[in-house]
């Protein structure tokens, strides 16, 4: 399979392992790696047309996605925008903070509009939302990791109180997702080769384009087949 975007290097299986290493402290956050991981998860979870993605355990993978967003927004310099519900325009400084809606984060090192990541406010850790609200009230929407020291303190305290329980929960999510990704990856690779042979034998340009798009999407989420 040929890579459809050189910056998207993580497959579902890679993301699961990356998330585990981040939680274990075995790897430090990297902005583009985290952005790409979130993008792939968003694509997989939103692809209602894919029979493979329908078989994903959405709750477990969404948990990984939410954790990655929390790590991203608290680990790098950048600026944020807040949108009320489905509003097209973000809140202005004269607006009141919204209890429902979404936050959009632009990492400082990312230069492309598509590298901005967003999350529903209800899915973001409460300590992070509280700090964002304070920054917004102070007229500051540029943030740094130092702004979230209280979030890390809360996280550390939670670890001290229920470290064994939390570790067990994370391990349970990791194992379930690893088994699921392994099984579905094999199915995806078989489907890719089926599409590949269809593509080679197709003479209709429009149909060939559709088949190629399906192949690229499979590779984006499930990686290159070694067969």
Image: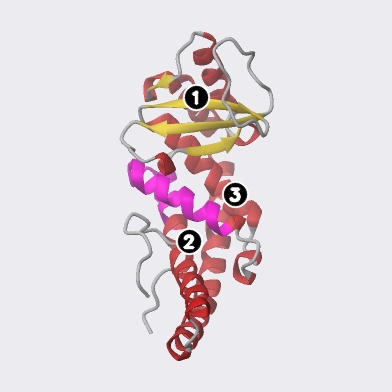
Whole-percent x, y for residue 42 in the image: 54, 51
Name the residue beneath numbered marker 2: 12
Image quadrant containing the C terminus: bottom left
Camera-side residue of 74 and 105: 105
Whole-percent x, y for residue 90 in the image: 56, 25
Please identify the dominant SS of the magenta region.
helix
Q: CA distance from mark 3 to mark 2?
A: 12 Å
Task: Judge whether residue 179 is colored magenta.
Answer: no
SS under mark 3: helix
Name the residue beneath numbered marker 1: 151
Q: Are marks 3 and 2 in contact (CB under 8 Å)?
A: no
Query: Which numbered mark, 1 or 3, is in the foreground of this view?
Result: 3
The image quadrant that residue 145 belongs to is top left
Residue 120 — which label? Answer: none
Q: Looking at the picture, does residue 24 appear above or below residue 81?
A: below
Q: Which span is picked out in magenta?
A: 17-44
On the picture, is 76 further left or further right than 150?
left
Name the residue beneath numbered marker 3: 62
């Amino acid at each position: 399979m040929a890579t459809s975007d050189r910056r998207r290097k993580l497959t579902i299986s890679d993301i699961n392992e990356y998330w585990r290493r981040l939680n274990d402290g075995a790897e430090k956050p990297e902005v583009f790696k985290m952005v790409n991981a979130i993008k792939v998860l968003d694509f997989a979870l939103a692809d209602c047309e894919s029979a493979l993605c329908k078989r994903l355990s959405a709750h477990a993978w969404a948990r990984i996605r939410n954790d990655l967003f929390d790590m991203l927004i608290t680990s790098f310099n950048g600026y944020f925008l807040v949108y009320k519900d489905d509003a097209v325009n973000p809140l202005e400084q004269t607006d009141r903070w919204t209890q429902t809606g979404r936050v959009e984060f632009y990492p400082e090192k990312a230069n492309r509009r598509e590298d901005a990541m967003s999350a529903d406010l209800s899915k973001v850790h409460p300590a992070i939302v509280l700090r964002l609200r304070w920054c917004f009230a102070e007229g500051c929407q540029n943030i740094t990791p130092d702004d979230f020291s209280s979030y890390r303190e809360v996280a550390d305290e939670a670890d001290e109180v229920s470290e064994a329980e939390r570790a067990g929960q994370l391990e349970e999510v990791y194992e379930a997702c690893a088994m699921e990704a392994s099984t579905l990856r094999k199915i995806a690779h078989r489907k890719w080769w089926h599409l590949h042979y269809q593509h080679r034998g197709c003479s209709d340009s429009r149909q060939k384009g559709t088949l190629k798009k399906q192949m690229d999407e499979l590779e984006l989420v499930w990686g290159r087949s070694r067969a």
